Amino acid sequence: MIELEMQKVNLGYDRHAVMEDINLKVSPGEMVGLIGPNGSGKSTIIKALCHIVRPRSGKITIDGRDIARIPRKELARMVGVVPQLPLLPSTFTAAEIVLMGRNPHLGLFQSESRRDREMVQQAMEKTGTLPLADRYVNELSGGEIQCLLIARVLVQETKAILLDEPTANLDIGRQVEILDLIRRLCTENRLAVLAAIHDLNLAAQYCDRLLLIDERHIHAQGTPAEVITEKNMKEVYGAETCVYTHPVNGLPAVLLGAHRSRPDSSNNQTAE
Amino acid sequence: MSSRAQPAMIMEPSRRARIYSLIGLAVLLLLAIIIATGVGSVSISFPTTFSILADRLPFVEITPTWPDNIAAIIVDVRLPRVILAGLVGAALAVAGATYQGLFRNPLADPYLIGVAQGASLGAVIGFLLPVGWHIAGFGLIPLLAFAGALLATVTVYLLARVGKTLPVTTLILAGVALSALLSSIVSYLIISAGNKMHGIIFWLMGSFSQSQWSEIEIVLPYVAAGTAVIIIFARLLNVMQLDEEQAQQLGVNVERLKIILLAAATLVTAASVAFVGTIGFVGIIIPHAVRIIWGADHRFLLPLAVLTGATFMIFTDLIARTVMAPAEIPIGVITAICGAPFFLYLLRRRKKAIF
């Protein structure tokens, strides 16, 4: 079991600060959602937690150890990442891409074993990607690639998973399917999960806690009900919203307060 | 979908096909060596060539049925040339495949980051120097070519380095720019070279006419060690095809891998180029041909490229020294004349993305 933690972390690229004074913690068995406007630094936090972006100051620890001192390969056995829709090399099949998730477990002179291939098969079954196994990845849709990357992070067998917009390209059926799967794995295997999720309703439904990010800072954090409030939405997104309570599970749900109640709006076919 | 029927065996069939291809290509390479050593101004039959070559293997004793001078032609004159051609072909193909994989760029070849122009400048300086030094039995030209190749690559590397990282695009651009600079110096030196111009141009286009066993003794360790290192890292090169961030997230120490593979591929290329000149086309086209036929998995791509490159170079050198005999055509001319149509044919009949 692994705990992810950031203490007084500043992040940025060159002279451009992205995030300041970030304190966060993701515990085993907990699914934490990162929400916030475009460009607020959600991806940067995820990249920092897998040591792609180095902190300018502060301390990032994985399982209590300083991330900078963990060798790359060992880190990849602790923390798995589902990146935001990357370009994949068109010359590999879907199964080969998933098989690459076994890399951190293989020695330099080792080849994937039958067991590795069986794990690939199971992960592809769970994510509904098995029928795609022999297809070349340039033939796949964005949603199919998303599911493939989730299969890959499953075979990586890490105790922590970072997801950058895992549902961005999925239809609502697949969104629920994939988040159900992640939520179940998180609880059953006591995984520490941090997911940047654009969709506030999905974030509220699936995450134990939410971090609302704005203007280089964590604006609010806590349970979905504490974070998703009309006041916070107005402050961070500048959008008029109505926050309701979900009729089935009692979690907050957001509706946009679009101004379409003008009398002539019925004639306006091209309204957004 | 067939993958549902036999899901446990995903990827296995193509794997087996590629192993058979490896064995088949190894046999083809041996045949190429025997055929190429038999053909020349004195024609020697295939069985005789085979017997003479077999006789040289350890633990094999064959009662000679051939005159000594025939054995001498085979073993001392033709065999070193054939072996050197094979070595250089293998080296350029494996280095080309490595650069293409590392840079994720189909236009990459072994000469992309300055090796060829550095070697050319070194060699041209060697031609122009009024002294005829020999160091350890070798002329100045291979030494200067080797030094020039390494010096140019190290310069490109240092220019492209940003802090602790080596951005691939910067590396390519620095390589192209430095190559252009060195190339213009080489051009200037050639036009002011007077009667040495012909020799320089022949060197630049490549030739195996000076091949000796002593050269093989020098080239072989570089090519063998470099190729072995590259093949060891083949699986990581596959992971690198994703992109550098994903490779890191999957546990690859990307910066270290880049340096190891660049060093190995550069040494392999520099050692080859130093003795035979800057032979073009092989390093860019052989890896692509192999990729089209057998796929992009570097664990097969690299060894298949070694065998294909060696065989291709042996046959093209055979053509270079026989079609206009006793005159020789520079091998760089033949590689493209023979290789390009075949490659274009492969390109036309491909059914899937090749890069």
Image (cartoon, coloured by chain):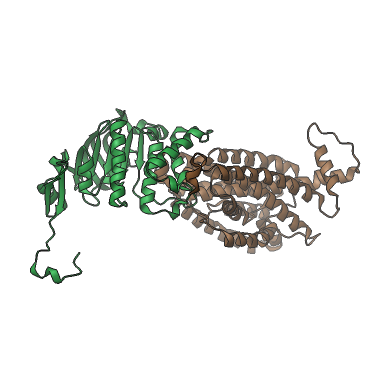
Q: At which x and y percent is residue A234?
A: 12, 51
- Can you tell which quarter of the image residue A267 is in? bottom left
- Nearest the camera: B71 or B151? B71
- The colour applied to the residues of chain B in this rendering is brown
Q: Is residue B164 visible?
A: no
Q: Residue at x 31, y 39 (%)?
A: A182
Q: At which x and y percent is residue B163?
A: 39, 43
In the image, taking residue B194 as reference, residue A155 lies left or right, namely: left
| Count of all numbered marks drawn on residues in the image | 0
- The colour applied to the residues of chain A in this rendering is green
Q: At which x and y percent is residue A200?
A: 20, 48
- Can you tell which quarter of the image residue B15 is in? top right
- Can you tell which quarter of the image residue A228 is in? top left
Q: Is residue A11 visible?
A: yes
Q: Residue at x 76, y 59 (%)?
A: B328
In the image, taking residue B271 as reference, residue A86 lies left or right, namely: left
- Nearest the camera: A127 or A62? A127
Q: At which x and y percent is residue A249?
A: 17, 41
In the image, taking residue B188 as reference, residue B212 lies left or right, namely: right
Up/down of A8 relative to B175, above or below:
above
- Nearest the camera: B105 or A234? A234
Taking the view exactly as shown, the residue that stands out farthest to the front is: B5
